[in-house]
Amino acid sequence: MNKQPETAIIRRITPSLDNARYAIKRAEGEGITVEADIFKEGHDEVTAMLKWRPVGASSWRETPMRPLVNDRWMGTLCVTEPGAWEFTIEAWGDVYFSWLHDFDKKFEAGIRELGSEILEGAGFVAAAAARAGKKSPDGGALKKLSDALKSADAEQASVIAHDSDLAALMTVYSDRSISTTAEPLHPVWVERERGAFAAWYEFFPRSAEGKPDSGSKFRDCLGRIDDAKAMGFDVIYFPPIHPIGTSHRKGRNNSLKCEPGEPGVPYAIGNCKQGVNGGGHKDVAPELGTLEDFEWLVGEARERGMEIAIDFAINCSPDHPYVKAHPEWFFKRPDGTIKYAENPPKKYEDVYPLNFHNDNWRELWDELRDVLLFWCARGVRIFRVDNPHTKPVSFWEWVIAEVKGKFPDTVFLSEAFTRPKMMQELAKAGFNQSYTYFTWRNSKYELAEYFAELTQSDLKEFFRANFFTNTPDILPEFLQKGGRPAFLIRAVLAAMACPVYGIYSGFELCENTPVPGREEYLDSEKYQFKGRDWNAPGNIKDFLTKLNTIRRQNRALQEYANLRIHAAENDQILCFSKATAALDDIVLVVVTVDPWQPQTAFVNIPIADFGIGETEPYVVEDLLTGERFSWRGARNFVSLNPHTRPAHILRIRRLQDRAEGQDVFA
Amino acid sequence: MNKQPETAIIRRITPSLDNARYAIKRAEGEGITVEADIFKEGHDEVTAMLKWRPVGASSWRETPMRPLVNDRWMGTLCVTEPGAWEFTIEAWGDVYFSWLHDFDKKFEAGIRELGSEILEGAGFVAAAAARAGKKSPDGGALKKLSDALKSADAEQASVIAHDSDLAALMTVYSDRSISTTAEPLHPVWVERERGAFAAWYEFFPRSAEGKPDSGSKFRDCLGRIDDAKAMGFDVIYFPPIHPIGTSHRKGRNNSLKCEPGEPGVPYAIGNCKQGVNGGGHKDVAPELGTLEDFEWLVGEARERGMEIAIDFAINCSPDHPYVKAHPEWFFKRPDGTIKYAENPPKKYEDVYPLNFHNDNWRELWDELRDVLLFWCARGVRIFRVDNPHTKPVSFWEWVIAEVKGKFPDTVFLSEAFTRPKMMQELAKAGFNQSYTYFTWRNSKYELAEYFAELTQSDLKEFFRANFFTNTPDILPEFLQKGGRPAFLIRAVLAAMACPVYGIYSGFELCENTPVPGREEYLDSEKYQFKGRDWNAPGNIKDFLTKLNTIRRQNRALQEYANLRIHAAENDQILCFSKATAALDDIVLVVVTVDPWQPQTAFVNIPIADFGIGETEPYVVEDLLTGERFSWRGARNFVSLNPHTRPAHILRIRRLQDRAEGQDVFA
């Protein structure tokens, strides 16, 4: 009760995650449209300012909000740099404009005995002059207006009070001494460009050269990286690169028996007999080279305009140095031995899970943070995090904040394939990107519903998808059964629907031999060396190259929440668009989800949303083929063949001009 | 990072107002069904407890929550006493039940080498024994079970582990050392009985005897009170009883000129020449009697099982003692004189508004609190607050908390007829009840929509309506035009739809002469003495008496959020029901909203919701007339006549028994 109590009321701010506990996410340059209920007692005119700033900045940027209806207000801000931002709303009753409102009513009612009112108004203007500073130009101007008002009669005062300069100055120098600022501040995380728009290519460095019986080293990886670059990928993601345990090492196809010479699973991390930093998470497997080799490769990628992402998998093999140094970090049996991982009745004897709530948990958490910082210091800024949903969310919230505190441009991708609320909570806790259910959404209905959920529900505020078509663990049935056309279809869906997407190598070769009856790869390179011809016949490298080129050339495809589903009169044809707010880039994707039969449909283009009149001609250019079609009206016919033309990716070109009887399209 | 960090996640708790900033409201004995998203990393079994207590109690009551779907959980608590309560949720990963789950999976898979697992389980049981206390019966039982487990083989262990006593004990003595408790605590305000169920009767004490040219005194009010009691009302509400100013005193029909002997408007409060406490808000008008007389009347009402509510109107006449003692509390003109109230171009020279943000605001706020406490000390516990929306909400939040801190049974009714968000915010800030838009909702569509909004939207959690049929300021057009049938209709709607409702005296006499073209009373007693025959012919006192009796006899009508609208196949007939959760009281109201013509309709009774089979007979008893009708099926015919039978108020009696070929109904 010491300071003046709240007068304006600010409630139900959107977007807001759990009462501003978590940051919403945006890409650089994206807008945030903020709404709130704003009102005040009595009949004063209310002014509301939307305020925002990078966290740590001393001053706010601000823009006035405007009332919509029923005390709901709206304003839009724009975040211009990557990093942590915050916004809030300040609102107050504006004494001057309230005075003006009452003055006008009396004046319009014919009252001219307004001496006291005019003096009061002059007083408000004089106070604004003082706030502006007596010697400032604005202060001087306000002082003059105040003096003019003071000596004005009612008619003159009415003219002065409606001077547009005065209104502008009184807005700027409004009396905010009893304003209300909404608390808590609303945090915003702004992604750097590659956090918001990227094409990922995952490969095992030991498979770089595709040799069937021995592994490649970091120094052998440039060929694969250049090939990925040629296809248009810009993030190279490596599964774990650390020493691999030998105890209970798994053999081919997850065999419990490992033959001599078999390379082991990179996720069984740690071999205290290897490496210069103990043989755990701060070392590279010697069979891949040295830390210096890795750093050299990171540099080579960077010179190519690419980045290397590594895996942060908190698994320890029984040979991990932590097992000896910190047995208290692990789960123990009654006899004191350390427990291996289980999913009863299955046993994973090659992996020891860590106990994040052990009595010495702080040392464990610090160590894991230090692992991340270690790789950041070696140039890595993107981490794909393995199974984060089996560790406490509070750990992620803490460790991501710690790492971003030192390396703000770090990007974390959550590999949580679990229940939706947990996946969302991890995104709130700080993960920049998330794996999704995309891999298992195949029918038109499923895809349309899921795309809409991701881009049009509240999820869009904080959960940013990274659409992987496949992973070393997931060979979807659709790819197994649908063959090459299925690969084309899934590539179109991933690359067009989501600004961040990825493939796991082998996808470009349409590899699809499963462990029978499972969605897993037979002879997976997780367990063995893998021979491959990276230019094997039937590959879809040209198609992927085309898709990545289209993504780069069309800004609409680089935005996240602009996806809209449109009606297509065939259950096998999905139609969606992505457009920039200015409508200077509109891409319409029409894709079959049937990898076997040709399909045709009438599709319904929302031409009004695209600024095209009902009878106005427009041109659609197929960015895959270069063909151009002249369309008119909303309903248009398409014919797709999964083998030859699985999709139209149509750039919509609006009528720009009609010169000498000739239509010119944008 | 010093204590063990959060492990379970608890989000999106409902009901919750502005992240638990404000209390939800309930009546004594009402349930609160709480839902939340609850989950945890990994695969542990999660336990969640709903916990609640009166504020200040040291220990929690608790009940387990159960999962619904998709990590959404539900539990129901019951608040048993009036006053401030709070609830929260505690959740944790249950190590024992997680162990049991894994043990079962291994056992079912045929594994019998489970020595280590059994020892581990025995350890969990032993730890629970220690938590229960070694010497307690539960501790002893757990210790025995632990010992039995320790020496058991796999088959025996499986039997012991599924002992139902063990499960119950392990639930009670679960290890909560790393539990998460949701913050902040969620406040709940529980109304005392008359705050949740009451019939209000408003009269001006000076009009008690209905004398046309002089006023009655407090000592003359018992007749009116007894009459109200006979009609079934239990709260008597008096407009302001304080000294009335003489400066700019208004005359009859709001005339600016007051004739000698005219009594003045009770809302122009304060006359420093009167009263023993300065002549302001802590005094009674001498023409009504003394403070002792008022206290005597409060006591008389209490002896009749009734309560007197007074008006808290923060208006000051120019003669109020504050004007001299605290000129700084008021708004001033540039020449230093005090401003009267205005709604430009209208002037209200008999009223000075207070400035709640004046430099000496704390003294003002304290004084206003002291006014409320003054009347509380004199036995008043219900305040109808005049125009709260023109004072800061922060003031109300503070002052209501201050008063309830000393007199927890105080009830505040907000007389805010303003925009919906402000009305709602006042309810959140602490007002127990609120005036509504009911007075202006006349058509079936409007009524159905508004009833549903009040009782089925989020509003039901905090905004509790008090349906007034009329007020000294509002004579609705419907009553003006519709005559006596309109009064019957509006009485049915108010009394049946809302547990708290009221009439302003004269309603029972069907007074409906307006100021022409306005929704105001001609010759309003706000400005003059008013002659009345309280038993004038054509009065509806018997009808009101019947309605109030029905309300008292049917618990379903005493609950707030149980109103449901049902289809009636006529735009002039509204059908709604109120039923107890146990369905032991079901009241169906079918009312015409046409005050002129007879109307008929088929109405659709949700018999399934009432536990009545499609072909099952049931009896409806009209509580207004005593008639009984035998119905079967959902669709039934009604015929209403606004002059003779404006409504059916039907108690639904279900088939109870069929004895000797005779149907018996509840």
Image (cartoon, coloured by chain):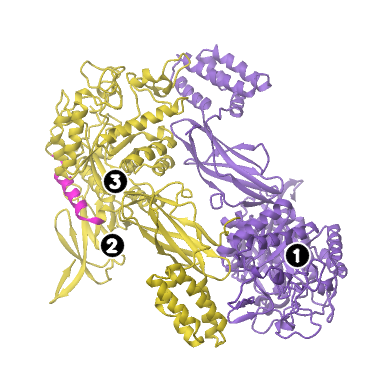
Chain colours: A yellow, B purple
- x%, y% of residue B347? 63, 80
Labelled disc at residue B189 = none
> Which comes sooner in the sequence, label 2 or label 3?
3
Query: In the displayed structure, would residue B141 be above or below residue B449?
Result: above
**From which residue to which does the magenta span run?**
A538-555
- x%, y% of residue B150? 55, 13
Q: Are marks 2 and 1 in contact (CB under 8 Å)?
A: no
Type of the residue with mark 1: Ile
B553 left or right, relative to A196: right
Residue with the mark numbered 3 = A195
Q: Quadrant of the C terminus of chain A?
A: bottom left
Q: Can residue B653 be seen here?
A: no
Q: Chain of mark 1?
A: B
Residue with the mark numbered 2 = A605
- x%, y% of residue A34? 42, 59
Q: Chain of mark 2?
A: A
Residue with the mark numbered 1 = B310
C-alpha span from label 2 to label 1: 64 Å
